[in-house]
Image (cartoon, grey):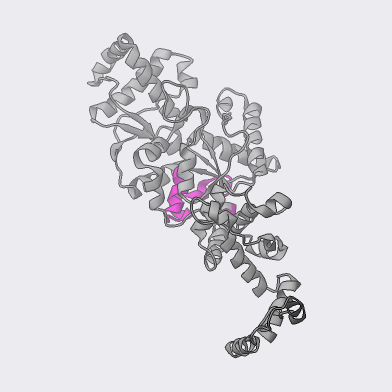
Amino acid sequence: MREFAVFWGCTIPARFPQIEKATRLVFDDLGATVHELAGHTCCPEGTLVKANDESAFYTAAARNLAIVERAGLDVVTPCNGCYSTFKEASSHLTAAWREREAINARLAAEELRYDARTQVVHFAEWLADHVGAGTLGSKVTNPLWGMRVAVHYGCHLLRPQPAVRWDDPLNPTKVEELVASLGAKVVDYPSKMQCCGGALDRVGERDSSLAFARRKLGDLMREEVDALVVVCPSCFQQFDLNQAALQRANEDVNVPVLYLSELIALAYGHTPEEVGLGMHRVGVEPFLEKWGVRAADKARLAEHFDVSLLGTCFACGACKDDCPVCKIDTSFQPTEIIGELIRGDLDAVIARGDLWKCLECYTCQELCHSRIGMAETFRTLKELAMEADAGPESVSAAYAEFLRTGALGKPRESARKKLGLDPLPEGGGDAVARLLTTSEE
């Protein structure tokens, strides 16, 4: 599905044009041919219209979809509310054919007819099911490596079934897969599936709306996320604008919020200025600054390790309980050390010194279905530790002895003689010492 109509809805063009800009950039980057059709109105929003007049709700929704049908297209919308309205109208009017015909009698005055043929697709659904996470990730130029990103779906992207049915309504994963394809670490959190609560503002329940935002933002801060990604402009409004209101009231909340297309546009190399991130009420500078630091961390790590393998190793973690040291000393967690490296804490790992507990027994490598293991990573860490004078004194002393004598120990000839063993041939330690001294010079 590369050619379709786009339905922006009311909220995005009116309040968040930066979301529209980012989405247009992503459509272009992914080669989509997008048509904007004249005559569209509000979807309409359910709480404000359907509660007053159900017939008006279905008539306005059918008219919008009839315009798309007349163009012979399907429709993609980046708004959960519009998506929900259209999916509900399509489901209802497909079954209630008499009501559909009554609406069509009204639409005939505009030479329109709605036969429920148009496919309604959300922007996130289009990315997940029509583009695919693999294709999305293949076009990334600035990976979000090491960034901790949480996802908020919003209720109307997933429910109610059977009108909406593209991901598990209670345990969805598809948007997480999209975010992960950009290189970010997706972070789970307790209130992930909680409604944003923004609709409470529309019915005069301001305090309750802020309470919803406060709870989720608190969860996100406790999980130390770098950003929250949303796929709905109303949810964006709740977590960006209302978070700004909480900040003005001196509440300790600070979670940058990005619409999904903004995150993709950044990963595709578009600048914050081009996308219009300066229009956010809660500044995204902390996210951008940390992203720059993480890119530097990755470049430094890549000087010594295969960063992609580190990521694969940490994401798997299947062998974390197989390390023989872990069975004796539970304070040694090699997979967590790999995670620290990915988070950019190379210096802290080296300084702390528990990396020396790795026996280099290669158990992890033999059990690794990807044949990665962690032994070679820890060998490299030990070398870096010695270069930084952060290794155990015993290792430094042994190496100094090796440089001096070319050997780490001498045969005990007296003990060997008691066992009737002949003297060993003269060793080459002196030759090795001279060789190493010459090499250092």
* Residue closer to the observer: 219 or 40: 219
In the figure, residue 75 lies in which quadrant? top left
* Residue closer to the observer: 220 or 348: 348
Work out whether 8 lies above or below 258.
Answer: above
Q: Which residues are magenta?
A: 260-286
* Residue closer to the observer: 107 or 354: 354
Q: Residue at x 76, y 77 (%)?
A: 418
- The image position of residue 120, as x and y in percent, is 35, 29
Question: Would residue 355 appear left or right of 319 to someone viewing this image?
Answer: right
Question: Would residue 204 appear left or right of 26 to someone viewing this image?
Answer: right
Question: Would residue 135 appear left or right of 199 to someone viewing this image?
Answer: left
Q: Residue at x 37, y 47 (%)?
A: 135
Q: What secondary structure prevails in the magenta region?
A: helix
Q: Is residue 270 magenta?
A: yes
Q: Is residue 230 magenta?
A: no
Is residue 417 something one can see in this rendering? yes
In the figure, residue 4 lies in which quadrant? top left
Seen from this angle, which residue lies furthest front? 420
Work out whether 420 lies above or below 392.
Answer: below
- The image position of residue 219, as x and y in percent, is 65, 38
Quarter of the image with the C terminus in it: bottom right
Q: How many marks?
A: 0
Work out whether 306 lies above or below 40.
Answer: below
Is residue 288 something one can see in this rendering? no
Quarter of the image with the N terminus in it: top left
Seen from this angle, which residue lies furthest top? 98
* Residue closer to the observer: 438 or 57: 438
Work out whether 408 lies above or below 255.
Answer: below
Q: Residue at x 73, y 51 (%)?
A: 328
